Structures are given as structure tokens and as C-alpha cells.
Image (tube, rainbow, N blue to C red):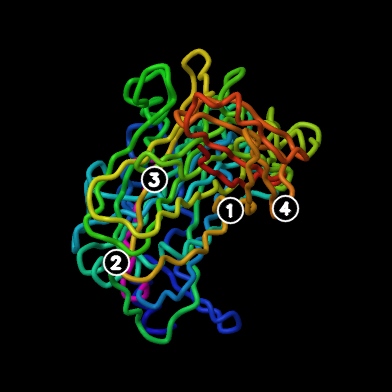
Amino acid sequence: MNKFALLLAAVGISYSASAAAQEETINVYDHVVFYDGYQGEVIDKDVNDGVLRFRNSLYSVKIDNSRLSYIGDNLRMDVTIGALCDNYDRIGNVNLAFVPKGAETYDYQTVDRIEVTRFITPFMNKNKNPREVPYTYEIANVGKILKDKDLQGKYDFWLEFELFGIPYAANQQVAGCADRNDVFDGTINFVFTPLSQPADETGNIVVPIYIKYPEDKGNINFNNYNEQATDTLGVTTRTFEFEIPQDVTDSKIYLILTNHGAASGGEEYVRRQHLVYYDGEIVLSYKPGGVSCEPYRQYNTQGNGIYGASRSELSWKLNSNWCPGQAVPIRELSLGAQKAGKHKVMIRVPDAQFKGKDGDFRPSLYFHGVTSGEIEAGIDQVWFEGPEIKFTKEGSILNFTTSEDIAEVVIHSYDGRQLGNVYYPRNSIDLAPYAGYGALIVTFITEDNRTTVHRIL
């Protein structure tokens, strides 16, 4: 074992290198056990393994900075969740906390953090194989943050692992789970191809905008019936304000959002158009889901109401906002150069209903800019851009051609009201019925649910 591996072992983080693949692995969590999220007493709080246990559903580990400086152009995070005594689908996530340098602990309610990745657990019976589900994320931009010398000099990076589970159903339904309160175990690895010399990385500007509250805090993230969760009661619109501390040459906002509410007609199962604005201008229009959940069936070893008989691709695409066992998509909002000062992000879901005042959307957003150069792409869960669109106009008729086939064109007013839609193979829109609305948001959607959005007068 080399000196670096011995150093990491001394602080509870293991290290390995693969000569064949020329990759290095930093193991941050190794089968750490989560317990009943509603239980107030923190289980294992005194275990001397380098893991801070703030709650039974939220843990944190300080990452050794010395090796992070060798991260190359790519960084992969591998998360593995093991089945214990929660057999339902739960929401989990990994956060990066910025803790004042040298602190041995911190107040998790006040320290700055960003949510890096999110996942949904499958319905798992611990007595059936497979007993683990893997999630993989390519997070090149996070690598830039971790190896930034100025940030390293100011902060220690702590990786938070959050997974809220409860054992009550499994206590009755899963053999061997009676009277148990352990719900999942989890492992996290960083994997990267190392640089030969430490990176000379500076100039990364990171601004946390919003991070979701866990489910035990109630439905206070984003909906239309709680005054804490919406700009206007009865309207599913929420605005997030933040300040960029200095000018940047390139920037992005990273958005993670999942829709919850499993009651009859709940927002969990109804796909809605989401509109995202930056400083008043539309930057993203999308519907969540639209993918097949069949690839995750193998991990859903507990019977449930989602995975019954095999379903068609169309059936999945029409009503799946997310899949149990899926890594949640990370959506990039590319902003380019930005000036220092105050800015706003607004999310609208104009058709959301929240029947019976049930359900909640859970967004997390952060800003990442650089003072010189560009931010690398490389998030493989990102909402990829749709086709190129070209327009010609004849009177009130807007003709369009696309670089690939599309499934649907959706038209919204700029304040988020859906006005109409056009289904391919039509390739024109009559704008006359929309003359009184001023600017329109026109979203072109491909068969595989990628989108291109245009602002049209």
C-alpha cells in the first residue's frame, strides 16, 4: 500500500488504483447503514469511523484535499444502495458541503452546500437478488470545484450522504425485518483518471441557490398550496434569488427536481410541462420522465403497484416522472458570461394541480461559473439539447424545418399558460390565434423526450 493509501486509511477513507484502466478510486462511504428517518435518537452516533451522523438519514465525511488536486478532466461518482428493511421507493441524494477550514464538525443547518446527485431507490426485498442497485454519474464540473486551489484554501469539502427511509412496512412484509430499524446501506466512490501533476485550478465561483428539504419537514419545497412553497397561492410558480459575487466568462445552473405525490391523480404520475426562466427570459422547457422504466425492473424485487405485468414503451413514457431505481437527471442551464450582481431563477409548472393539497416538487439548484475559460460538459444524466430548428414566415403562418423528427410542438404564453400543441408530421403553426399574447414559448419535443425551446414574437 502506498503512502497516500495509508494516509487515507488512517482517516477512514480507502483508496485503490487500477493500473490497467489507469483510474484511481477514492472510497468515501463503505456500506454505511441508514436507520429509521423518523427516529429521533441517532443510531451509531458514537461509532469511530470518521462519519458524522447528524440524523439517521444524513451523514457526512470530510474528503482529503490532497488527492483531489490530481482529478483530471472527468470525475465519476458511483453510488450503490443495498437493501435492508425498507422495501419502498425512497429519495436519496449526495451533497457537497463547504465547511470552514479545519473544523472537525459543523452545523448542517447553516453551512453552505449544493446537491450534486439524486436517486430513487427501488422497491427491494433484502432476501431476493439483486440486493444492491448501482447509480453512476459523470460530474466533470464538480471535479473543477474540488480541485480549485482557492476553494481548497478556504474550505474543507465534506460529502453528505442523505437517504430518508422507514422500516414500518418491511417490519410486516419482509422476512427477517420484524422489530428492525435499519433501512438501507450505502457506498460512494469517486473514480477519476489522475493528472501527473496537481491541477493549477482557480477561479471557480459556486453559489448555492436552493437545496430541497427532506420529506419529514412537510411539503414546503415547491407546490401551489403552501405559502412557503410558491410565489402565489394557487399558482405553481417559485422564484429563487441569488447573487453572483464577480463577473464570470462562462456559467451554468445545475437543476435537480423530482415530482412527488402518490395519491390518486397525484403529481408523481402525471407528466407536466416545466418552464424555467433566468432573469425573466425562458431558458428551459421540459417534461420530466418520458423514458421506459423497464431497465430498472430487475432491481424492484418487492411487489409494488408500479411494476406489475410488463408495460409498453408508450405506457411508460406517458406517465412516468421517474423510475424506482433510477439516477435522477441533472439538467444544465447554460448561461455563458454573466455579470456580478443579483439574479433570479423562476420555475413554472402551470398545469400542476396537487389534488387534495397532496404532493410536493423538490428542486435543488446551484450556480457554477468560472472567471476565465469555460466549464467542461460531461454530465451523462443531463437533459440533452433537442434538434436544430429553422423558421420561415408567410403572413401568420410560421413554417419550420428540423434536423431530426419530432413528436410534438407545445405552445405556451410567456407567463406559462399552455395555448396549444401541434403533432408531427405537421411542420407549420398558424400564429393568428395567439396574436394577443405577445411573446410565445414554443417547445419542440423529440420522440426520446429531448427539447428545443424558442421564444417567438
Q: Amino acid at mark 3?
A: Leu
- Relative to 4, 287 lies left or right: right
- Gap in angstroms between the C-alphas marked 2 and 1: 25 Å
**Residue under label 3:** 365
Q: Say whether disc 1 or disc 3 marks the residue closer to the N-terminus.
A: 3
Give how far across and how far down residue 351 sits, in percent.
54, 23
Give how far across and how far down residue 236 sits, in percent.
44, 25
Q: Amino acid at mark 2?
A: Thr
Task: Give 199 or 95, whichever is nearer the viewer.
Answer: 199
Q: Residues within 10 Å of mark 1 (few under 14, many from 20)?
A: some
Q: Amino acid at mark 1?
A: Phe
| Mark number, residue 404 | 4
User: In the rendered view of the protein, which quadrant contains the N terminus?
Assistant: bottom left
State yes or no: discs 2 and 1 in contact (Cβ < 8 Å): no
- Gap in angstroms between the C-alphas marked 4 and 1: 14 Å
Q: Quadrant of residue 2?
A: bottom left
Q: Is residue 64 magenta?
A: yes
Q: Quadrant of residue 157?
A: bottom left
- Gap in angstroms between the C-alphas marked 3 and 4: 31 Å
In this view, 214 is above or below 226? below
The local secondary structure at tag 2 comes to loop
The local secondary structure at tag 4 comes to loop
